Image (cartoon, coloured by chain):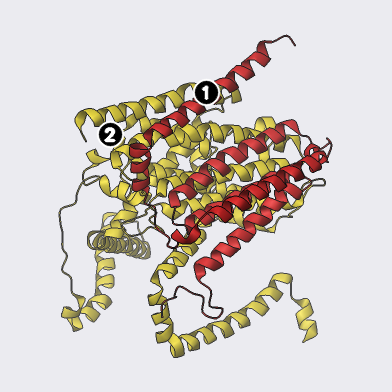
Amino acid sequence: MSRAWGRLTLPGKVVFTLVPLLLVLSVALVIVIAVFGGAMLDILVANVGIVRFLVAVTILLLLAPPSAFIIIYMEMKIIALMNLRLGPDRVGPWGTLLSTVHGLKVLMKEDFTPTGADRIVFTWAPIVVFMASVMGALVIPFAPGLIAQDLNVGLLYFFAVGGLSVVGLLMAGWSSYNKYSLLGGLRSAAQMISYEIPLTLSVVGLLILAGTMSLNTIVENQGPWFTDWYVFQQPLGFVIFFIAATAEANRTPFDLTEADSEIVAGFATEYSGMRFGFFFFAEYINVFIMSALLVTLFLGGWQAPFPFPELHIALDPGSLGIWLLLGIAIVPVVATLVLAAPFYLLRSSTPWWQALIAGFLLFNVLAVGAVLGIAYVNFDFVAGILWFMGKTYAFVFVFVWMRGTLPRIRIDQLMGFAWKWLLPASLVNLFVTAAAIVVVGN
Amino acid sequence: MALGETAPIIGIAFADILFVMLAAVMLGSALMVVLLRDIIRSGLAMIVCFAALAGIYVLLQAPLVAAAQVLVYIGAISVLILFAIMLTQTKAGPARLVFQTQSAAAAVAAIVLALVVAVAVGATDWGEVGERMHTATDTLARVLFDEFVLPFEVVSVLLLAAVIGAVYLAKREESGPS
């Protein structure tokens, strides 16, 4: 027994202990739910406000790494295609699992603290940066009713929490005991403080139009046609916000905080392992959240660009009776055969099994499409989240595109641009909006 | 069985428990600001102190004030202070702080301030404030821009004067003979 245990590798030992433990725990959980399920449900329902908040926060935290993985993969692949390279193509289909592998690699790397570093501050810096990024997602409305917390001061909360990440970057830069890190930290402080002002001022005109700071209400105001989106009433504000958001997210051409050709990697130079991973995740979550905020404020959030005609698919599966079972059994087979037939008939060189596989795949695509279509028509939040994610990822693509296209600008140009161009422009925007509202009379 | 106003076993209101926790964090970090040897850590403790204060504002049903506290005091003022410290201090420089040589004068100032606060607290009639009321954002804005618009504008003129003064001081040093 002990010899067999000694032969196991370390992952083997972990799995060998964890699997029985998980089995026992899940059986216990099933029994507990079976016995006390009703009472537990009553308690949960009675405290639905707190439960909803906890669930929403947990979901946001859990969704943060996967969305960072998706954006990292997008960045690797899209920039590669723009550079006429292949990009990742080894792990998973078209290399889609590569960013996951990056995440696991980061977990397994050695995690060290440099000599002379301020240990406590060094440890806390990545946590502050990551939490500041994720907490911003709390007020973003993903779909009708799908918002973690509809705060009355939502937009102000977003800017307040977003401003916290600069504290984390400063902590990282200072505590690393490295002049490149310190330079990166100082640059990030100067840059983010400068760009926070036009970022905040550029939406004040929009706030005057909307009359609220609740992001949910702002989205609801922008319907039903795409001409109601605030981008058409606030084009200057949109442009300023986009530029300032790029700088706030530390993206190219404003990524001076980690300019690898000048100061190695800026504030992140001395970080390794999962602590670096937190910085890395935070950057990509920032890209997602900035795109989401841009879409929420200026492009109608989860609103469709035009109102769909009211469709009601009155499908009652129960009324079909026995035919429902027969249909579930027969339709896939028949549809696969019908869809495979053209492949087999049109090209005589196609073997029959390849035609069958093609037909089956085509049937799956059609079935998923039909289910999504029904869900889109019948459930508001499905339609909302599809539009929201579509628009958001379009902007994520633009951010990646800019990284593949634009060179980094100099620090004096960066500060001069913020103070001499963006700030006056946002003031002009605010003034014109206020004057227009006074003239038009609301 | 919804959660009530008071915690089940100890019988203290949840709001009071939260307040005591936030106040403890605030006072502890405020002490750290004064007592820590490393000036950067003092600055970071000050940020924790401000965050706890923002939490107390939320508890007092004033979310706008809390958000402004985080935005202005943590996001701008503390960061500027840290920025200035990092530009002027080096790790190789003297670790002991300059202002800890002035402890006698600081003690006198602290005692005087404590007396003033104690007198002010003792003289105030606290009986009126028994009930928490929610400060709606738009109500606050209406009061600020309707009833108190003149003091508001005067404050902004004061800030403008401060900015002009700062620019003047910075400019004069640059153009003067070195």
Residue at 44%, 56% in the rendered image: B61
**Is residue A25 in view from this perspective?**
yes
The residue tagged 1 is: B161
Q: Position of residue B156 (x, y in %)?
A: 46, 29
- Chain corresponding to yellow in the figure: A
Question: Could you say which is closer to the camera, residue A204 or residue B139?
Answer: B139
Residue A232: image tag? 2
Question: Could you say which is closer to the camera, residue A213 or residue B50?
Answer: B50
Q: Is residue A227 left or right of residue A391?
A: left
Question: Could you say which is closer to the camera, residue A17 or residue A95?
Answer: A17
Question: Hey, which residue is sitting farthest bottom in the picture?
Answer: A35
Residue type at numbered disc 2: Phe
Q: Position of residue B47 (x, y in %)?
A: 62, 47
Chain B is which colour? red
* Badge 1 and badge 2 both on one subunit: no
Question: Could you say which is closer to the camera, residue A188 or residue B15?
Answer: B15
Count the labels in the image: 2
Residue at 76%, 49% in the rendered image: B35
